[in-house]
Image (spheres, rainbow, N blue to C red):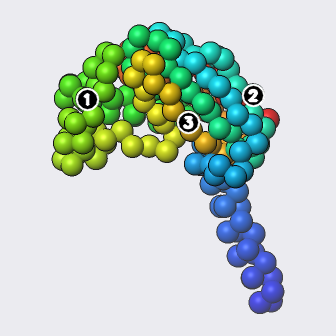
Amino acid sequence: MNKIITLLIVLFLSSFALADENMKIGSKGNLNDVTRVIKVFMYDNYYYPSSFKIKTGETIKFEVENVGKLVHEFNIANQKMHIEHQLEMEKMVENEILLSDLIDKDKMKKMAKIDKSMGHSHSNSILLEPKQKGNIIWKFYNAVNIEIACNVPGHYQAGMIAKVIID
Ligand SMILES: [Cu+2]
């Protein structure tokens, strides 16, 4: 009887673990686990390449370069997360941290002490000024509805979204 109960508990808990795993957008990856390097260019207002095919469990290093004239973001998330993050980015513009072609790093630091979200510190995102480069290492799980997008106000709406197909 005890064995059956234990088995049921194990099944119950593992089903939760699986559901949680599937819902995740992935996680910050380690350099040692990188299976592929993808170079990405950010233009005004689109990405090249404009879509990514990724296998479940792959760890990708994205080498991102902003070749546009505006500040752009490379953010790996689902749509709900992007929409939420857009409110933070709007606030960064209101506080004059985020200008069209530059990021005021001093103001960013000062404001982040009052409001952490103004620091724009996220493992799934990088924000780059024109001519800047940056890397993100990301481990993908079998998640659905991931988009790589830019949440600088107006850019998502202008279509700065790259599709991520995971199989
Ligand atoms: Cu952008």
Which numbered dot is residue 137? none
Q: Looking at the image, is mark 2 or mark 1 nearer the viewer?
A: 1
Residue at left 70%, top 56%? 18
Quadrant showing the C terminus: top right
Res 159 visible: no
Callout 1: SS: loop
Q: Spatial distance from mark 2 to mark 1, Cα to Cα?
A: 35 Å
Res 56 visible: yes
Residue located beneath label 2 in the image: 53
Compared with 32, 163 (above or below) is above
Compared with 5, 97 (above or below) is above
The amino acid marked with disc number 1 is Asp
Q: Spatial distance from mark 1 to mark 3, Cα to Cα?
A: 20 Å
Residue 97 image position (x, y, % from top left): 24, 29
- 106 on left or right of 160: left
| Nearest the eye: 23 or 112 | 112
Residue at left 30%, top 27%? 103
Residue 154 image position (x, y, % from top left): 38, 15
Callout 2: SS: strand
The amino acid marked with disc number 2 is Lys
Mark before the other along the chain sequence, 1 or 3:
1
Residue located beneath label 3 in the image: 135
Residue located beneath label 1 in the image: 104
| Nearest the eye: 19 or 148 | 148
The image shows a total of numbered marks equal to 3
Q: Residues within 10 Å of mark 1 (few under 14, many from 20)?
A: few
